[in-house]
Image (tube, rainbow, N blue to C red):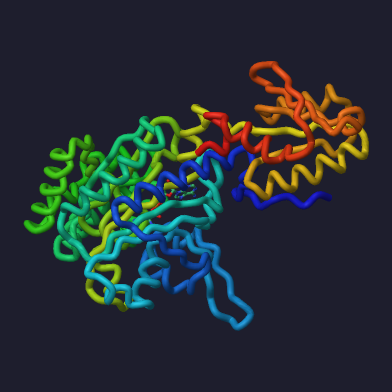
Amino acid sequence: MNITGIKGMNDILPGEVATWHFLEQQAQRIFQCYGFGEIRVPVVEKTELFCRSIGETTDIVEKEMYTFDDRSGNSLTLRPEGTAPVMRAFIEHKLYNQDSVAKLYYQGPMFRYERPQKGRYRQFHQIGAEVIGVDDPKIDAQVLAMLSHYFEAVGIHDVALHINSLGCRECRPAYREALIDYLQERLGELCSDCRRRSQTNPLRVLDCKVPACQEATALAPSMLEHLCPACETHFSQVKNYLQELNLPFVVNARMVRGLDYYSKTTFEMVTNSLGSQNAVAAGGRYDGLIGDLGGPALPGIGFAMGVERLVLMKKTESLPTRRLPLFLAVMGQAASDRAFLLMASLLKQGLPVEMEYAGKSLKAQMRRAAKFGARHVLILGEEELFRQVAVLRDMDQGSQQELSLAGIDTRLLQICREEPNGPTAD
Ligand code: HAM
């Protein structure tokens, strides 16, 4: 029986990888411009890190983590998200001693044992960014400006920015109580998950997709009406800066996040084009998290984008494919051996080249060259080899010229690099 991959964990095949590179490179380019430096952290961490940061009563910690004991009996977890590991590294390496503000970005696989469906996987990839050390609402607006700059740069337009404030440790407890009281009176209308959540994590009830729960919570008290003056001012300043930056947004008071570390501003970039998995990016402030993890009491804000979801949205428009500048079509063993050496020399000088190994007919080789979108084909057969020449065919013009084998690599480099859209021109 064939061994297959694991459900919900995808192979990214060569045909798709150009889109991934494009999305990753644009993030690098834009995030670096906003002053972010890359950080790389392990994919496995101590389980306790996620329990303490994401929260014991969240879906992620309760039922979605890949947790196992290593051979020494330590409980480890494949990271379900990137913020907690980045904060752990920030504290462990005392990055706060380097500057009063840290701007870090990261990318890589995350793991959650969720029910796989379009846009939701068990291994998925995030590109994320975090700013530590600033509680000024300007930075909330700047992070959102960077996110929207990114979406523009990668050509994804069908997204809307939803924002909310989840208050702080001063104002959230009273709101939580008000919400519990409201839910208590409607327990009979809630699904079994929400009946349990109404005590352990009542805010999550607002996020339940079951229609009966949505109906029962339609008139639930809103966090925005319970913000303390400091949170209220912070949120209105965030909105003002967004307006000044001409960044459209929708205030969505029912938006709660699936991780407990958030405070004040939270946000999601949502789309209509991905069905139920509609958040392409999400994040918010986590002003208490670094202190909770044993670090200094520094505020933080950040987001992560789901790369698979970006790729799904990008699928509709295909990226321009890069053409192969040169294909070597050969006939006969001696010509094949000569072409092999020529190819090695050209590759070493940075020119992408392919050749035929299977001794196919010239017609079949031309078909293969066309499949690569080859700009030129160099034809080398026994007769050409005897005369120490090769025939170079320009596939776009349909013209041919004979080149002497002496010094042919220099000549080919010249011709192929002259192409304005050739792969070596940029
Ligand atoms: P999150 O909302 O759990 O937040 O995930 C962020 C994004 O990752 C989602 O909006 C979605 O695009 C993608 N994503 C999440 N789960 C899956 C999945 N199973 N399959 C495919 N894509 C998925 C966080 O992870 C926070 N750490 C974000 C953050 C950074 N907050 C502050 N800083």
Is residue 220 toward the left or the right of residue 332 in the image? Answer: left
Q: Is residue 236 left or right of residue 399?
A: left
Q: State the residue in front, 251 or 341.
A: 341
- Determine if residue 199 is in view: no
Q: Residue at x 44, y 59 (%)?
A: 81
Q: Is residue 188 left or right of residue 350?
A: left
Q: Quadrant of residue 296?
A: bottom left
**Residue 79 appears in view:** yes
Q: Quadrant of residue 292?
A: bottom left
Q: Is residue 320 above or below residue 256?
A: above
Point out residue 408 in the picture as x, y percentages from the top left corner.
Answer: 73, 37
User: Which of 60 and 284 lies nearest the eye of the viewer?
Assistant: 284
Q: Is residue 365 above or below residue 229?
A: above
Residue 259 place in picture, x, y as percent: 36, 58
Task: Return the x and y of residue 79 as percentages of the image width and height.
Answer: 49, 63
Residue 373 lies in what quarter of the image?
top right
Residue nearer the viewer, 370 or 208: 370
In this rendering, would 54 be left or right of 216? right
The percent position of residue 142, horizontal first and vertical second, equals: 23, 49
Q: In the image, what residue occupies the spot 80% across and 30% down? A: 390
Q: Where 200 falls versus 324 (above or below)?
A: below
Q: Residue furthest top?
A: 398
Residue under the image location 31 percent in, 50 percent down: 33
Q: Is residue 274 above or below residue 286?
A: above
Could you tell me which residue is drawn at 85 percent across and 39 percent down? Answer: 357
